[in-house]
Amino acid sequence: MKTILNALAEPNRLHIVELLRDGPLTVGEITDKLGLNQPQVSKHLRVLSENGLVEVQPIANRRYYKLRSEPLQEMDRWISSFRQIWEDRYDRLDDYLQKLQRKEKNPDRE
């Protein structure tokens, strides 16, 4: 999980992942969409590939990069482990806010 987060911490790599969400792209297409140089994009793709986030599909004389779902599913499971904590805190906050609203409407009651 840590390697996935480290790979996505760099803004251009995160943007590449967002671009690939819509489907496979070549290095040239990614370069055009990001406005970066081809060597920069290739370097970012190499890091994403080494961390298992993308894979390469050679088709004819082109290399298409596409997202791998497994690392993103792993990240989703990790985030989900915090979801219950957040929901409990939001429930407590909601209870507290409702209590404050009741006090405002009826200042003599508690």
Image: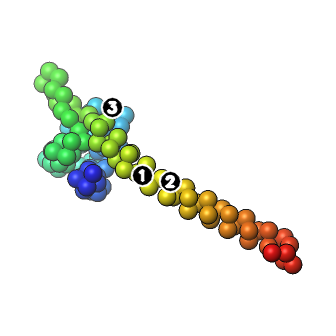
Residue 22 sits in which quadrant? top left
Residue positioned 67% across, 68% down in the render? 96
Q: Nearer the viewer, residue 88 or 73?
A: 88
Q: How far is mark 2 from mark 3, CA to CA?
A: 32 Å
Residue that label 3 marks: 23
Task: Kindly identify the residue that appears in the image at 35 percent across and 37 percent down.
Answer: 21
Mark 2: few/some/many CA within 10 Å (<14, 14-19, 20+): few
The answer to whether the residues at label 1 and label 3 have Cβ atoms under 8 Å apart is no
- Residue count near mark 1 (Cα–Cα under 10 Å), binned few <14, some 14–19, many ≥20: few
* Residue 67, numbered circle: none
Residue 20, percent across and down? 31, 38
Spatial separation of the CA atoms under disc 1 and disc 3: 28 Å
Q: Earlier in the sequence, mark 1 or mark 3?
A: 3
Residue depicted at 28% across the width and 42% down the height: 71
Specify how the rendered protein is coloured: rainbow
Element at label 2 = helix
- Give the foreground label among 2 and 3: 2
Instruction: Work out how far the residue at label 1 is from the one at label 2, CA to CA, in angstroms.
Output: 7 Å
Q: Position of residue 64 (x, y in %)?
A: 21, 31
State whether residue 97 appears in this view. Answer: yes
Residue underneath mark 1: 81
> How many labels, in total?
3
Q: Identify the amino acid type marked 3.
A: Gly
Q: Which residue bears the numbered disc 2?
A: 84
User: Earlier along the polypeptide chain: callout 2 or callout 3?
Assistant: 3
